[in-house]
Image (cartoon, coloured by chain):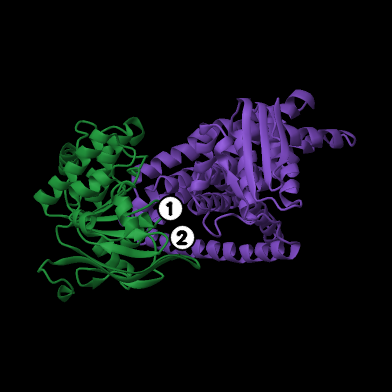
Chain colours: A purple, B green
Amino acid sequence: MNQVSVERVENDILLIRLAGRWQLRGGLAPSGAFERELQALPVVRRVAFDAQNLTHWDTSVLTLLTRVSDVARQRGISVDPDGLPPGIRQLLDLAQAVPEPVGARKEQRLPSLLERTGAGALGVVSSAKDMLAFLGNMTVTFIRLFGMKARYRASDLWLLIQQCGADALPIVTLISFLVGVILAFVGAVQLKQFGAQIYVANLVGVAMMREMGAMMTAILMAGRTGAAFAAQLGTMKVTQEIDAFATAGFSPLEFLVLPRVVALILMMPLLCLYADFVGIMGGAAIGVGMLDLSWTTYMQQTAHAVRLSDTVGGVFKSAVYGVLIALAGCLRGLQSGNSSSAVGDAATSAVVTGIVAIITACGVFAVVFYILGI
Amino acid sequence: MTALTGNGAKPHIAVRDLTMAYGSFVLMRDMTFTINHSDVFIIMGGSGSGKSTLLRHLIGLNEPAQGNIFYEAQNFTTADPGQRQQILRTVGVLFQGGALWSAMTLAENIGLLLEEYTDLKPREIRDVASLKLALVGPKGFEDYYPAQISGGMQKRAGLARAMALDPGILFFDEPSAGLDPISARRLDQLILDLRDSLGSTVVVVTHDLASIFTIGNNSIYLDADARAITASGPPKELLEHSQDPKLHSFLTRGGT
């Protein structure tokens, strides 16, 4: 156990006795007593140490000693380290060898509410500016793409198409089948009361085609692919690969962002159509298995209920969602900082931005489609 | 610009009154120096003095807060993006970790530049890539991805990529960082060989004393506290004649 005591000798010398085992695990000795003693009258002129009974020590003793000597130095009291073991003296010198640069220490104070609100508001403005600049640059990049001037590697595009197309099929199958099943269940319970079970087919068909197919796929892809884009680009920033592209004269927007956006624009509609189909199969499974409808009736009813415009509308929406997911993922990736935690933040932020953008767009579409009567 | 040097050497890069800043924080101010053709020019300084940031300015990854950078007689700082790309085609950069594009094999890394900026056929590109790899070391590793080879090898492959277009200027960011002493020495030798045989100008950012004295024939020293260039000249002369205690202690690892 660490033992420490303070004693006055010759009126103006403070003798600090250290004894026992000093270990960080055993806790630090409180330094308050010394600081009080150093300030007490009569005035202390010198601090000395007695460490004869100190059996074991580690940096716990140093923490106390640096604190004591800092306070002593501030008050112009001399510290006489002769009574300390040589090892402690050496480390103490080491700890005090480098003067702290002025202004190096971080201010440890909680900013006021007003300050935080202000900083937050300014942050919103600057991030909105960044986003607009990015969108502007991407528009220019797309114009170059249509003018056949954009440079990117075709093999990258094919790989990305595979990654965000075919590779996503299993999870899209699972989720959209279950969404179909859930919709059918919810509908069945209500419609059974009126003996109108057959309308489960309408409910599932219309809901999947108009909204759920596109939206579920989009949210799934935001989590699956949007986050991956952000993590890839973020890591490329950390490893300076993006700098290397820039100095080699390849625009990262053309080379990295463009193929990702194109891949998702191409694949999202296909995934959406597939999700619509699988969702209807999920509904049919419930209709046939639990509501005693036949396959033919169910499918006929579905075909009757769903209009072409529902399907086309859903597919169109999914393409827009694809653009939003890819842009959100790439923007956050390119904005990422230079550390592993920053890449993690970028991936998180990509998913959040992506989903917010999807839901907002979904709301806008709902209003526009209503007005247009689609 | 030629008038600025007295000894008849031709200036390749000239930096005039360059001030580097992050927002309102000024990192270095009023830097003026000239890098001549076929120099091995060392940018040295302690950690955090802004050596790598200076390199980023020289290759246009950061914008100067003030001042200008000239390549030959052309002002790089005020050039439009097209002209900048023209200038950058004469430049090769070896980044600290190699910064090889991880989605491509070594041959593709080098080939990408050749594909873009030359009219070579795929077969020829492959041959040039193999040659560049053979020149710097990782011969026979053409079809490996960067993650499959060691850090030292990645660095050499990064150098092969920097040399892909036979640039007139090669920039090295901490070439010896993360290399064992022997590999670091071999890389130093390689830098000298490339300068001698290809006549390239070489700019090296480093704090590795062994490299500084072995390869450098001109240098500047960035002082983080003074926020300015406090010394310039051939490293060996700086060691002999410098009166600045901070520079002297830097060049002697804190000795006397």
Q: Quadrant of the C terminus of chain A?
A: bottom right
- What chain letter is assigned to the residue under label 1? A
Q: Residue at x 75, y 52 (%)?
A: A42
Q: Name the residue at the right extreme.
A: A193
In the figure, is residue A268 to the left or right of A373? left
Q: Quadrant of the N terminus of chain A?
A: top right
Q: Position of residue B1 (x, y in %)?
A: 18, 74
Q: Amino acid at mark 2?
A: Met
Residue nearest the observer in this picture, A155 or A333: A333
Q: Position of residue B113 (x, y in %)?
A: 25, 50
For residue B241, say whether it is visible.
yes
Is residue B191 shown above or below A125? above
Circle 2 Cα neighbour tier, 10 Å, few/some/many (<14 / 14–19 / ≥20): some
**In the rendered image, which residue does mark 2 sit on?**
A138
- Disc 1 is placed on an element classified as helix
Residue nearest the observer in this picture, A236 or B27: B27
In the figure, is residue A52 to the left or right of A265? right
Is residue B9 shown above or below A246? below
Residue nearest the observer in this picture, A249 or B213: B213
Q: Residue at x 65, y 52 (%)?
A: A356
Q: Position of residue A270 (x, y in %)?
A: 53, 42
Q: Amino acid at mark 1?
A: Leu
Marks 1 and 2: CB-CB under 8 Å?
A: yes
For residue A304, say whether it is visible.
no
**In the rendered image, which residue does mark 1 sit on?**
A258
- Please tell me which of labels 1 and 2 falls first in the chain: 2
In the figure, is residue A336 to the left or right of A144? right
Is residue A48 shown above or below A181? below
Could you tell me how far apart the alpha carbons at marks 1 and 2 are, in whole angstroms? 8 Å
